[in-house]
Amino acid sequence: MTASSPPNAKHGNADKSHNSAEAAGKSPSHFIRHMIEQDLGLDKHNGRVQTRFPPEPNGFLHIGHAKSICLNFGLAQQFKDRARAACNLRFDDTNPAKESQEFIDAIKADIEWLGFEWNGEVRYTSSYFQHLYDFALQLIRNGKAYVCSLTPDEAREYRGTLTEPGRNSPYRERSVDENLDLFQRMQAGEFADGEHSLRAKIDMASPNINMRDPVIYRIRKLRHHQTADSWNVYPMYDYAHCISDALEHITHSLCTLEFEDHRPLYDWILVNLEPESLRKACHALGNMGADEHYVLPQQTEFARLNINYTVMSKRKLKEMVELGLVSGWDDPRMPTLSGLRRRGYTPAAIRHFCDIIGMSRSESIVDVGMLEHSIRDDLDTNAPRAMCVLRPLKVTLTNYPDDKQETLSLPCHPKNDMGHREIPFGKTLYIDRSDFEQVPPPGFKRLSPEREVRLRGAYVIRCDEVITDDSGEVVELHCHADLDTLGKNPEGRKVKGVIHWVPAESALAAEVRIYDRLFNNENPDDKSLGDFKNSLNPDSLQILTGCLVEPSLASAAPEASFQFEREGYFCVDRHDSRPDRLVFNRTVSLRDSWGKQNG
């Protein structure tokens, strides 16, 4: 490409198209925004809006997490002109057995890529382990928690069912002193994993199973990626999450609907801690002013994102990675943000998708076509055009001078001013095999014997001779070029078809990876189909070697997106592509052909 149209200008352009709408305040409203506006009107939180995004570092983020990211970080952005608004990034790192620094780094990179900034330093639940431990001692002293010595199997038996109440543990009435002693010895490492647990003392007859004396601490003698070997006991999510929110002075704790039944426990823990101790700890951590009114956080639930033809379970995604069914967490077929990024999805398209699907408390399934529409819409506006021949067929222009070489100037975009790219034109070129038929079917408007077609940005040509090999396969076409048709229509006849091409001498070899949906069943989690892996699409990846692209793509940067004319939208693979070995990934087809194929 010429200097006026750098091929790696993709993300700036893509973000700009949707950022203007966001800056204009066009993000759709929803019940959570209404709630925050009401709280601001009542000055419930001293003019503050403090949200948080609390991922577990046990895998890569997927498109479902993008909805929560856009909600929490987006609300902080939307209210920053009306309130002291910010969003924390806090890793819920309470289970070191499944966590790693690799996942932490990937999550941070994904959030930054999406275009969001967290408030201050990255936070970790593990940073509050001492506070959480001290609060557990406080609950024990106040008779609100006890050390239970039931085995895991016994605990399940005592817990009861959805229709039958549970039974009190025989250790429920241990004395405060005994509970304090046992819990401190648990932390000291005197007991084996699973030998004891610390449970909240609530109500074993509660209709909400989450309130039946839930475990809030368990023994896990594991090295932690942040705290090393400092702890032998680790807090459970339900216990650590609400207290971490309180310590960070979160105003609105937003989570998906599966945590709705956990909200009573969230509230119970905070209400049963001594309010002044929470306030002092929050102030000591620098999360509130000395004279600021302290208000406990409020949990609010919203519907999670479900998309058809997609698996959103982190456990199942991890299983596919570990079994080698995909190349990794960032395989372009994966619904992970890293996978979508590598496939060519832009931050603006994902943010736009999260806007248009809306926010509600009703579970529903979003058509994956909406996600594909978002990226098509973005790239149609922002992706420069280029030509790529996926299955090359040689064409020789018999009347074109052997020693003649032209340089044609083609626009990088048909509507937007992205400059022009220069493409050499000579006697020999390549077209795509799909654009030629020896016996054309009805309605075929491309090249065939004795028929004419226009080469994109060049001449009208007519096929005069078909060259085949011994097996009868077409290997070359001899064509006649109407040299009076560059930039104008031929006289006395109308040529309907236009096909793309690349120059034989200067075209660049490329590998093109044609990605499709990873699952061929609308609901891969449908238990009637057996294991979800039974729904894997065997044609989700086709690797085409021997492809040829126009020479302007020689300097295409990793992640740069293009519309390969008449083929689809593609991007330069961010890991595998090199100047001497170009690799392009198909982001999405030009049109949704899935419904026709699978209808």
Image: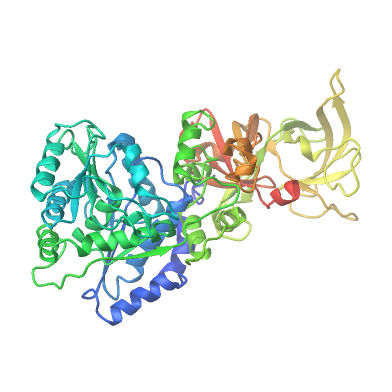
Residue 544 placed where, x, y %? 64, 31
Q: In this view, does 313 lie to the left or right of 568?
A: left
Q: In this view, does 27 lie above or below 332?
A: below
The residue drawn where x is 50% and y is 51% is 4
Query: Is 179 or 303 nearer to us in this picture?
Result: 179
Image quadrant occupied by the N terminus: top right
Q: Work out whether residue 22 can be spotted.
A: yes
The residue drawn where x is 89% and y is 41% is 440
Q: Quadrant of residue 257?
A: bottom left
Q: In which quarter of the image is residue 186?
A: top left
Q: Is residue 117 above or below residue 315?
A: below
Residue 13 placed where, x, y %? 48, 56
Q: In this view, does 141 lie above or below 479?
A: below
Query: Is 353 or 466 nearer to us in this picture?
Result: 353
Query: Is 239 or 208 nearer to us in this picture?
Result: 208
Q: In which quarter of the image is residue 405?
A: top right
Q: Is residue 513 left or right of residue 391?
A: left
Q: Is residue 538 left or right of residue 278?
A: right
The residue drawn where x is 8% and y is 47% is 177
Residue 46 placed where, x, y %? 21, 75
Q: Work out whether residue 24 can be spotted.
A: no
Residue 577 placed where, x, y %? 50, 33
Query: Is 259 or 287 nearer to us in this picture?
Result: 259
